[in-house]
Image (cartoon, rainbow, N blue to C red):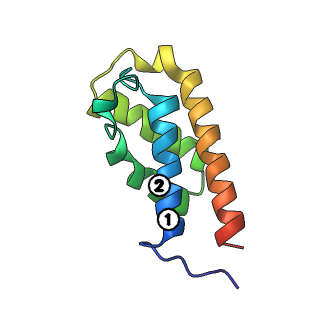
């Protein structure tokens, strides 16, 4: 039987923190991660990513679409897709690794 997930519990907090780390250190589409005053700039995207992880039937495609949407529509960076598409793939792989480790520890 699968473990019940506490949405305010340490497991979810840890999952979100790891995703925050990836967004700050690896994604950083606006190039600000060398300025600690901007720490937390990408935190508002973490919850949407967690929802995708828990609900999507095609996580890779949905994460790519979400990240691209954020950069184009929310941040207004129209040149992002051509320049950073390979970075999306790398970031998604890291998020999937975090997700798979989370599932092994909490959902099996």
Q: Position of residue 91 (x, y in %)?
A: 57, 34
The quarter holding residue 67 reads top left
Q: Residues within 10 Å of mark 1 (few under 14, many from 20)?
A: some
Side (left or right) of 87 relative to 103:
left
Residue 8, quarter of the rendered image = bottom left
Quadrant of the frame with the N terminus:
bottom right
Contact check, label 2 and label 1, Cβ < 8 Å: yes
Left or right position of 73 against 16:
left
Counting labels gives 2
Residue 76 is marked as: none
Q: CA distance from mark 2 to mark 1?
A: 6 Å
**Residue situated in front as seen by the camera: 26 or 83:** 26
Q: Residue at x 35, y 45 (%)?
A: 43
Give the residue at x 43% y 32%.
68
Where is residue 98 shown, x and y percent of the image? 63, 50
User: Is residue 19 shown above or below 32?
Assistant: below
Residue at point 46% right, 50% down? 49
Which residue does the image show at 45% across and 59% down from the upper left? Answer: 51
Residue at the outermost front position: 36
Reading the image, the residue beneath label 2 is 16
The numbered disc on residue 12 is: 1
Q: Quadrant of the C terminus?
A: bottom right
* Foreground of the two, 30 or 57: 30
Asked if 45 appears above or below 15 in the picture, the reply is above
The local secondary structure at tag 1 comes to helix
Q: Position of residue 61 (x, y in %)?
A: 56, 42
Q: Secondary structure at mark 2?
A: helix
Whether residue 23 sits left or right of residue 45 in the image: it is right
Label 2: few (<14), some (14–19) or many (≥20) C-alpha neighbours in 10 Å: some
Residue 24 in the image: state x and y as whole percent. 44, 34
């Amino acid at each position: 039987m699968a473990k019940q997930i506490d949405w305010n519990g340490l497991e979810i907090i840890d999952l979100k923190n790891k995703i925050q780390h990836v967004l700050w250190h690896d994604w950083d589409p606006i190039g600000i991660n060398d300025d600690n005053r901007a720490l937390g700039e990408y935190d508002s995207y973490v919850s949407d990513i967690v929802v995708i992880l828990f609900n999507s039937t095609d996580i890779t495609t949905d994460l790519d679409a979400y990240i691209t949407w954020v950069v184009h529509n929310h941040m207004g960076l129209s040149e992002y897709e051509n320049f950073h598409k390979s970075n999306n793939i790398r970031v998604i792989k890291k998020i999937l690794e975090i997700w798979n480790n989370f599932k092994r520890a909490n959902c099996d």
